[in-house]
Amino acid sequence: MTRNPASTLPPSRPGPIILAAVAFFYITVVLRTLAESRFLASWLPVYLGLELLFGVLFLLVLWRPFRRGVWPHLYFIFQSLLALFLVVLHPSLDFTNVLLVLLSFQAAQIFTDWKRWFWVVIFLLLIVLSLTLPLGAYGLALALLPSAVAIVFPAYMAIMQEIQAGQQKRQALLAELQKANRQLTEHAAQVKELSILQERDRLARELHDSVSQTMFSISLNSRATRILLERDPQRLRPQLEQLQALSQSALEQMRGLISELRPVDQ
């Protein structure tokens, strides 16, 4: 079974633009609550207190996101109930639905694969139903904009995670290629060194088998020539000719070996 590379990544850290957008949405909810202070009357402290609680928990999870265990699910359940309470308490204050949009963004930040989209669908249903059930078609119209934003945020986070996964995959591939290149270079050096040793062995064998034997023959013929010079000078000429032939042969063999020792580029 092939795993999605994005599922192995740690929770994504949103960029400054996304953080600014999230902060803007949250501050808008608080400011709208303050603007509706006359309508809320005695409920204003409750709204502000719950919104503050929501914001504190949201920031804590944004700062230290987690994926494992049941804690993320419990967190989203609690935050969803808190946001729904604010919406259901006064459905006409539809702006509190924005808190569910923020949760949709955070679900995309924390989860991957099917868990991400499971929670996104849950939040979309809560956004739509929390306004449609009490307000009907008018509530559905009000829910369209936050629903669209609740889709855009997770889609953006999914794209960023895919890009990050692709970058890590390319970096891993590059590291593997560099490692393979180093291994090939080392192997090529070893092969070159082995070739040099083999060539040295071959030259040594040739020196021993041919040139050294020729030089030994020259030495013997030199001794024989000296003896003939003292005892039988008439036989000296053939001996000198043989000695010259052996010397010429040895010289040609040495030239051949020396030419093999020359660098290729010369």
Image (cartoon, rainbow, N blue to C red):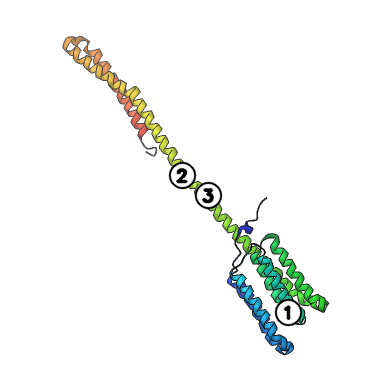
Q: Residue at x 64, y 65 (%)?
A: 110
Residue found at the far left of this picture: 230
Considering only order in the chain, which callout, 1 or 3, is on the residue closer to the N terminus?
A: 1
Q: Tag 2: Cα neighbours inside 10 Å, few (<14), some, or many (≥20)?
A: few
Q: Amino acid at mark 2?
A: Thr
Considering only order in the chain, which callout, 2 or 1, is on the residue closer to the N terminus?
A: 1
Residue found at the far right of this picture: 136
Find disc 3 in the rendering and name its residue: 177
- 258 up-or-down from 233: above or below: below
Distance of mark 2 from mark 3, alpha carbons? 12 Å
Quadrant of res 22? bottom right
From the image, state whether disc 3 or disc 1 is nearer to you.
Answer: 1
Q: Residue at x 55, y 53 (%)?
A: 172
- Looking at the image, residue 123 sits to the left or right of residue 66; the answer is right
Which one is nearer the viewer's eye here, 240 or 80? Answer: 80
Find disc 2 in the rendering and name its residue: 185
Q: Regarding mark 3 in the picture, which secondary structure is present there?
A: helix
- Looking at the image, residue 39 sits to the left or right of residue 200; the answer is right
Distance of mark 1 from mark 2, alpha carbons? 67 Å
In the rendered image, residue 87, in percent from the top left (x then y), is placed at: 75, 78
Quadrant of res 163? bottom right
Q: Tag 3: Cα neighbours inside 10 Å, few (<14), some, or many (≥20)?
A: few
Q: Is residue 244 visible?
A: no
Find disc 1 in the rendering and name its residue: 86
In the rendered image, residue 215, in percent from the top left (x then y), is placed at: 28, 22
